[in-house]
Amino acid sequence: ADFLAKMANGIADDLATTALLATDRPILVAPAMNSRMWANPATVRNLALLKASGVMAIGPAHGELAEGEIGIGRMAEPADIVDTIETALDGPLQGIRALITSGPTHEPIDPVRYITNRSSGKQGHAIAAACARLGASVTLISGPSSEADPPGVETVHVETARDMLEACLNELPVDVAICAAAVSDWRPAEAKAQKIKKNRRDGTTSPSLELVENPDILATIGMHGNNRPRLVIGFAAETDEIISYARAKLSAKGSDWILANDVAPHTGTFGGDDNKIHLIKRGAGGASDVEEWPHTSKTEVAAR
Ligand code: CTP
């Protein structure tokens, strides 16, 4: 924490900080510290300052800490640090800032219930890891997912669509945005503060839910006035008429590319390890063309 604070403020009072102040090479930090030090607003601020000036970060990880507590603060695994260094030094996406959304969202009904969907976050997390491996500086905005935070990626955990939008807007400007999250299209108009009871005082037993539409994160980024990324990529999760629905999303959401995938139950796409992509690119004069990818793993799709 102390070292990050010095770096963030350009203090050079020992050999290491002096060398860092005098370099124009990429810098990667792998912080390790007590979990409360890590969460301290001063550390959060210092790390944000460093990232804004292009410093990359890996970790810390969650686990057992030197002082015997369990929490966030363990140094990233040495093998992950070495991987990150190797690609950060000469990856083709060096200098590119990428924003990626992944996973489902949870839209609360009351304190114990929510609306969600079958998204696992596997595809979005794989894309974040692939971008980081190629040297990009990656922020992943993740809805609730059991996927681990990818190494070398700054992961922000959110729950609702509105939180996801806010977290994304906080990251702009970026060079590329890839929206892989299965954002819930609707949320309950009102999230009840107390658990809704089966036998309610007004005598009715089955409540009806009024739903309102959530903000569209991809469309907001794709049509952003001042801070539209140079490349905006969305997905289209369809169960029928895949290409025509996906083409419509390309223009409706101001995207450059749409990766259309079939999420009908028999395909196993949602929650599974494989995917079949139809890549639709915005062409000249409003035209668009389709590129068929082979049925392959989500990791391979991410790399492509
Ligand atoms: N998306 C988003 N915010 C939303 C809804 C969707 O960012 N509120 C993004 C998804 O991340 C994806 C793309 O928009 O990149 C298309 O999502 P999809 O679920 O296929 O389409 P919808 O816009 O939700 O339309 P529909 O449900 O009618 O197919």
Image: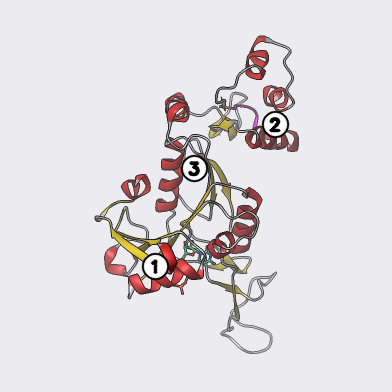
Q: Amino acid at mark 2?
A: Met
Q: Amino acid at mark 3?
A: Asp
Q: Which secondary structure, mark 2?
A: helix
Residue 252, horizontal then vertical, whole percent: 50, 71
Q: Nearer the viewer, mark 2 or mark 1?
A: 1
Main secondary structure of the magenta stretch? loop
Q: Residues within 10 Å of mark 1 (few under 14, many from 20)?
A: few
Q: Looking at the picture, does residue 201 appear above or below residue 182?
A: below
201 with respect to 241 (left or right):
right
Q: Amino acid at mark 1?
A: Ala
Q: Which secondary structure, mark 3?
A: loop
Spatial CA distance of label 3 from label 1 is 38 Å
Q: Which secondary structure, mark 1?
A: loop
Q: Nearer the viewer, residue 92 or 147?
A: 92
Q: Is residue 118 visible?
A: no
Residue receiving disc 1: 287
Q: Quadrant of the N terminus?
A: top right
Residue receiving disc 2: 37
Q: Residues within 10 Å of mark 2 (few under 14, many from 20)?
A: some
**What is the quadrant of residue 193 in the picture?**
bottom right
User: Which residue extends farthest front?
Assistant: 285
- Specify which label sits upstream in the sequence, 2 or 1: 2
Spatial CA distance of label 2 from label 1 is 53 Å
Q: Is mark 2 within 8 Å of ligand 1?
A: no
Residue 177, horizontal then vertical, whole percent: 52, 52
- Specify which label sits upstream in the sequence, 3 or 1: 3
9 with respect to 303 (left or right):
right
Q: Looking at the picture, does residue 297 appear above or below residue 28?
A: below
Spatial CA distance of label 2 from label 3 is 20 Å
Which residues fall within the magenta stretch?
A: 31-35
Q: Which mark is residue 149?
A: 3
